Image (cartoon, helix red, strand yellow):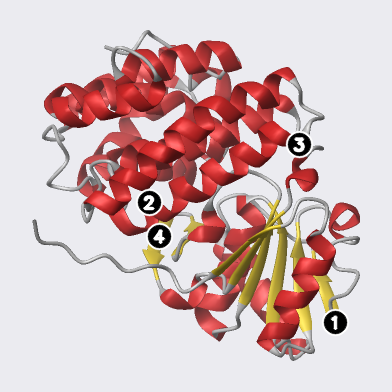
Amino acid sequence: MQFAHAWPEQRVRFATGAAAEATAEEVRRLGATRVMAVASHPARAQPVLAGVPVVVCHTEVAMHVPVATADRARTVAAEHHADALVCVGGGSATGLAKAVALSTGLPIVAVPTTYAGSEATAVWGMTDHDGKTTGTDPDVLPRAVVYDASLTLGLPVALSVASGLNAVAHCVDAMWGPTVDPIDQTLALEGIRTLRTGLPRVVEEPTEVGGREQALLGAYLAAVAFASAGSGLHHKICHVLGGLFGLPHAQTHAVVLPHVLALNAPAVPELDRRMAHAFAADSALAGLLALDDELGAPRSLRDLGLAEDDLPRAVGPIVAAASSDNPVPVNAERVAALLHAAWEGKEPS
């Protein structure tokens, strides 16, 4: 056995009911005195920012981080001489903060309000008319993350489900990512177990923090595993679909994941067995489909607004982006069949 594993240089705090105090403390640790806040919903973010020296609160947040949106945010940061960023919100808010940090090197304190997991990775992404471009850079990894489950109580159940299944997708993709190691797989399997127990609690008792704490913990484990293992076929597909057609990020992951799992898992039976155990099922696919049923997850790209005529446009970019070490060779025929099944909402096979 030979591998090298690097841990992220990041402080992670779970502080249910105490996000304001924890965020202010992390900002003080950075020595920041002129903070630019990035907030999807400024009214919800305001209590979190109470003790933070905010010089401007930037609220122009968009899904998939359009390049023009990122450019305007960088201008705002420069005009206000910001020396740090605090992002409060979901993956779009975190993504915008990362886009600013990518060119400025400003440190980030992230306060997630969904289960996107972007806060635990050094992955950035931006979109333009050609689609979505992603990359990794240590400057975009938040220096600190503050998890407060009470901030997720306002997240609607349907969006909680989609966001949580996005985290499950991080776990599954990490199992065979291009730079995966045994530590990544251990984190991913524990992430699956934690999300499998936490997400149904969110659906059953959406105003109770216990299930949401489990979902946040699972999302963090998933993101750390994914950040180290690298992006597999599933995420390549979803990034292309999101970048080309503007599909909702979390819901797209929820729809596509069973089809990728059905394609890859039979080719790696030992990994399938380990994931099945984490799902408490006979196979990884059976476990995921049972969880989807329990959560009422979205099942078709058609329902997300994608036109059938758009499917061929995505095939080439997905094949070009796919890793050569995917468990099953990726070709245009396989990708086209997978996309059409996901578009129709067919039972994965």
Question: Callout 4 environment at 10 Å: few (<14), some (14 to 19), or many (20+)?
Answer: few
Q: Does label 1 or label 2 sit earlier along the sequence?
A: 1
Question: Callout 2 environment at 10 Å: few (<14), some (14 to 19), or many (20+)?
Answer: many
Q: Please give left or right for residue 292 compared with residue 84 in the image.
A: left
Kindly tell me whether residue 81 is visible in this rendering: yes
Q: Quadrant of residue 277?
A: top left
| SS category of the residue bearing label 1 | loop
Instruction: Please report contact status of discs 1 and 3: CB closer than 8 Å, yes or no.
Output: no
Q: Does label 3 or label 4 sit earlier along the sequence?
A: 4
Who's the residue at 11% across and 35% down the image? 329
Residue tagged by mark 2? 225
Viewer-proximal residue among 155 and 103: 155
Q: Mark 3 belongs to which amino acid?
A: Val
Residue tagged by mark 4? 134
Q: Mark 2 belongs to which amino acid?
A: Ala
Who's the residue at 31% across and 29% down the image? 312
